[in-house]
Amino acid sequence: MKDRVLEVKDFSAGFGDKTVVKNVSMEIYKNRVTSIMGPSGCGKTTFIRCMNRLHELNEQAFHKGEILLDGENIFKKNPIEVRKKIGMVFQRPNPFPTMSIYDNVIAGYTLNGIKLSKEEKDKIVEDSLKKAYLWEEVKDSLHRRGTFLSGGQQQRLCIARALAVKPEIILLDEATSALDPKATAKIEELIVDLKQYVTIVMVTHNISQAARVSDYIAFLYLGELVEYDKADTILTTPKDERTEEYLTGKFS
Amino acid sequence: MDKGVKRILKLTGYLFLILLAGIVITLVYGSAASIRKFGLGFIWGKEWNPVSGHFGALPFIVGTLITSFLALLISFPFSMAISLFLGEYFKKGLIAKIIESATDLLAGIPSVVYGFWGLMVFVPVMRKIEMKFGILPYGVGILTASLILSIMIIPYTSSLVTEVLKLVPSDLKEAAYGLGATRFEVIKKVILPYTKSGILAGLFLALGRALGETMAVTMVIGNRNAIPHSLFAPGNTMASVIANEFTEATENLYLSSLIEIGLLLFVITVIVNYIGNKIIKRYSV
Amino acid sequence: MKWRLIKDKLFKYSVILFAFAVFIPLALILFDLVSKGIGAINLEFFTKLPKPPGEEGGGILNAIAGTFILISLATLMAVPFGIMTGIFIVDFKKSKTAKFASFSVNLLQGIPSIVLGIIAYIWVVLPTGKFSALSGAVALAIMMLPIIIKSTEETLKMIPDYLKEASYSLGAGYTRTLFKVVLPAALPSIASGVLISISRIAGETAPLLFTAFGNPFLNLNALKPVDSMPLVIFKYAMSPYDDWHRIAWGASFVLILFILVMNLLTKFYFSKKRVKL
Ligand SMILES: Nc1ncnc2c1ncn2[C@@H]1O[C@H](COP(=O)(O)OP(=O)(O)OP(=O)(O)O)[C@@H](O)[C@H]1O
Ligand SMILES: [Mg+2]
């Protein structure tokens, strides 16, 4: 049987009196890519932001139910520990503008007050950048600021930054939607390759992207989990009418 | 650690409010002796006589209001012209930069330097003019102070109004141009009606500035503690009488009266600034 | 028909005319400052203490040192307090205190400087029993506060949420996010706010009249009276001696040069240093 890393149990979340994610239950499998799809505003972002407890940074945010990471409820743990284990890459590339590429990669350590030796740091930086397919492009400018990089490179830098703390899961929220097709292709290739190190949960609107990279696809509609299955199954024989309509482009 | 830092920040916030409250309380407390002795009569008392111990603020209130409003009036066409120049006619380019730098420079000159220049250069000129017209040639006086003050507040009004003019939506203007209006007509019929409350706010804030302006005024107003009977007569403002007499005021009631003038000045400027800020707030949403 | 166009032209030219009229006072003032100011300046001007009227020479070392002390002390007090208050206003924006503080900043900025002089007199001069650099610095610091708070507030509001979220998603807490991500990004812009506040108070005279008071001798003790450039200008300007007037022109020139340099520095250096977000 496949390993489950994350188990979502009857989970709901929202803002104020508006419930945005409704009674979702699902399991995320280890070293697999799971895509979350659905029409705009259906709660995808809100849902994955709950997974590393970023959701609760919003003053009006609320949630109900459990999310278990390796069997432990993340809401019973220290959010800082949760976020170290579940990293996130955002829609907009967001390298820290005041830090060099090098410092960006090890930011997960410095921001947590963890002191590392020079060798350790060098190794983490090189490893992470290599895993993120960025090493060759930036190895000569590690000490320049990350902001001069192209959008695609910045996004890979953010992936390297997330990888550097050796998380179990990385969440990607439409990580390629601000990028051009070439940069997107590169990141898709990277995602498939990263499976060997981490579990990936990503939100995407791009059906062909989901087809190219995901093992599993979850379809959300108005906050409800309509369908969740192997990617092939969902893409070829969706069971629910709403999934089918979405896949054939009836709403977007 | 986060809890501690947040607590310290909150504490700083409270401290800031305590500072503000402290300023008000201090002024009231310092004025207590004068308030007790003269009551509301202080405000319309015409006599200011440290020797006999009679203190009334009316001459200074009148002096402050006349100089400030006069300065506002004199500077208005110039400030407005600069604002239209920078906010409408020449938004970019070299001459815009030059005008902008000129007003920045004017804004950067300290009050005391305006006063010094006014005293050395401008007052003699005024004296000559007054002699020509057969008026007592003080040189210094209400009008002289107002003129210097008007130069000082031009950069302030003009930069506020320029910002306001830049907020006019361009489709509004374009619609008028599309109907064949000239620029003058667009300014008169579209821009000014649209911006009038913003301009008013600018005037209020500039007035707040002028009311409290001290050094330049102190140096050229002539420092006479009586209600001025003409624009050429010497006078005193609330700020200038404090500047002039505060260190001389050894006697308790005298000092307290000066502090009460400070309190009145504070209240007036806070009200004027409050109105200005309120208008701006409403305007910018 | 024609008349409309003529009116349009007339208005435009009067706008240009009135706008350019600012050059008249500016040119007059600058001309006098430069022509009379430069003549008064020599090495002695910066290195010697003032001489009694009638005696040739002398300088304003006491005032230059005093100005330096006053500005340093005021900056030391206003910068940490101002930046922290600014952070408070932005990060606790939902709280009533923060909302009220944010609004009061404008009112504080509107308080005439002479009134703040009275405050510093009552708070510092009366309890200590003497005029002092410290009391002057307190008045100046209160004047710097609103400028620093506002620039901190405005800068922090511009820092996008996604940067903070990047930091949180790496497991960082509030404090580290503030110190390692938010403040570094905001620093150049806050620093330029501080420079602006310094150039605003550098020429302040009114609140010093009965706090720092003035002192013809060189004094580096914060608990004793000091002179300052604007105070010297005032005192010498009001004196009847030509020698002293000359020194006042020199001091005015130096003071304006200092303010100008501060302004240019803020404009060019720090606008380049701005962090690209
Ligand atoms: N900060 C917030 N405060 C209140 N409501 C919010 C907030 N953020 C999102 N919402 C609401 O929650 C719902 C779900 O938003 P969410 O961003 O999760 O959708 P999404 O599926 O990610 O959409 P998209 O595909 O456009 O990114 C929307 O109706 C949105 O209006
Ligand atoms: Mg989204």
Image (cartoon, helix red, strand yellow):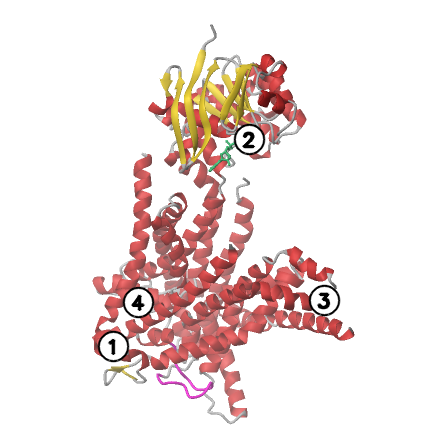
| Picture quarter with the N terminus of chain B | top left
* Tag 4 residue: C118
Query: Could you tell me residue B113's position as x and y percent?
Result: 47, 70
Query: Could you tell me residue C273's position as x and y percent?
Result: 53, 44
Secondary structure at numbered mark 4? helix
* Tag 3 residue: B182
Which residues are drawn in magenta?
A: B225-237
> How far apart are the alpha carbons under marks 1 and 3?
58 Å
Circles 1 and 4: CB atoms closer than 8 Å: no
Query: Could you tell me residue B112's position as x and y percent?
Result: 44, 70
* Tag 2 residue: A91
Label 1 lies in ligand 1 vicinity (Cβ under 8 Å): no
Q: Earlier in the sequence, mark 1 or mark 3?
A: 1
- What is the chain letter for disc 2? A
Q: Which residue lies furthest to the right in this view?
A: C2
The nearer-to-camera label among 2 and 4 is 2
Mark number displayed over residue B39: 1
Q: Is residue C250 magenta?
A: no
> How far apart are the alpha carbons under marks 2 and 3?
47 Å
